[in-house]
Amino acid sequence: MPLTLHVIAPIRPGEEVRLRDVLRSIGDDIKGRRLSSLHARPHIDFTRSRKIHFARFAILDDAARGPGRKRLLYASAYDGNLDDHLAELIAITSDMDAIWGRCDAYAGTARFGEFIRAHAHEPEALYIAFREGTVERIRQAISLRRQVEPLLDAEAGTSLAGILEAVSKDGSVGRHWRRAGRDFDAAIERLIRALPIVIDLWRAIARCGVANVFRGTQRIVASLDRYAVFRFSNWITRNHLPPMKSAYSSVDLDDGATTPRAPDRAPPTFREDVVAQNQLTVITAVPEGQADRVRAVLLAIDSYAKRLSPDGSLIGISTIHFVRWLLLDNDRRLMLVSDYDGSWEAYIDEFAELILSGLEAIWETADGFPPGGARDLPAFKQFLRDGQVPAEVFFSAYPEETVLNIINDLALVRASSDAVSDGLGDLLARL
């Protein structure tokens, strides 16, 4: 299963501007195509990586150390172990000191692992779309699909879905029993994966208390009546979202006029909608005394994501590759880190449509959360924008691939493997 890393390191005073310039140069040339051999700037050659799914750098405020102070965020999702990930990161970085040397306590590449571990933070909740999807496996699946696509173009009316259906419906006895065995193994695997949910519950109660766990769970499932189990639970407990306080948004809506946005409300530059995927980093304040309430919600999300969610779907949302929430600064701040498909607007809209009560359960105690909650969508979007941090660098190992594409690609790999095993290797050619 892929792992995630979240490093937050204080930046030395006076180094913020130069570090941002270095990172922006890397982010603007993420594939290294515009580097000059004579005047090469510091660069991370992410295209050489065989283990990194996603990576980003961002510069965060560091209010705890004083006005104007900053800290560096490095967040990644990778295959293998941490030592191998760090060794690869060193190997593909042309000048480690140009980035990490601007941070407090960095003592060179020889002690890079020690430095990273000292500044790493573990997520309270983590969702991974493909638990068994390594970078290599996903790239191989994409490559196979690209080999098949010319066949689809040549055959009018033939689609990838048609190929998969043709392979799956083949009548070979061997394939039938192999598919039945695989389905049985998958059912056992799901059962084994779900069993520790009871242990998760007791751990959550021990950390956060019965009241916080019960209330947090109720708040999450309040808008999930489309699932029979949650609909029954909500009916038994009379659990539902409270009525809207107002039918109107608490923010002024843009009516399409040409009046420019006020200078103090000008949005920062976000690297969004450049490729099929996007990234989102949001930091919000957690009021004193509310950390256990927030943590209980996150632990419930984490348990569901690990134990019950199928590949490629988090409560019906099929646009998320990785998402995680972390409590920082002695539980005074909450950070969301997400890698997803599509536009920012569509992503937030889908969240609000499918897991509305989950959004409210996570952020309802946050400073600045709108009075109308996430149902006041314009106000909720403004709340997220206010806490959003632009990424100076954003890398994806498969930037043009959506979650749904990858699901189909992996299915094609399984189907073609069965076809070869059953002597049906010419099936694709025949189609």
Image (spheres, rainbow, N blue to C red):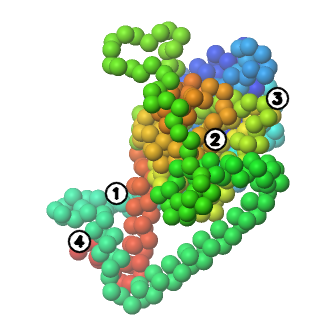
x%, y% of residue 226?
47, 58
Label 3, label 2: how far apart the Cα atoms are = 34 Å
Query: Quarter holding the C terminus?
Result: bottom left
Asked where in the image residue 281 lies, by quadrant, the reply is: top right
x%, y% of residue 238?
59, 54
x%, y% of residue 212?
74, 47
Asked where in the image residue 154 lies, by quadrant, the reply is: bottom left
Q: Which residue is mark 4?
A: 431
Label 1, label 2: how far apart the Cα atoms are = 40 Å
x%, y% of residue 293?
73, 43
Viewer-side residue, 105 vs 128: 128
Instruction: Classify mark 1: helix, strand or loop.
Output: helix
Left or right: 110 in relation to 4: right
Q: Which residue is mark 3?
A: 105
What residue is drawn where x is 64% and y is 17%? 18
Q: Which residue is mark 1?
A: 146
Query: How many neighbours does mark 1 have within 10 angstroms: few (below 14), some (14-19), or many (20 or more)?
Result: few
Which of discs 3 and 2 lies nearer the camera? The answer is 2
- As shown in the figure, which amino acid type bears the numbered disc 4? Leu
Label 3, label 4: how far apart the Cα atoms are = 61 Å
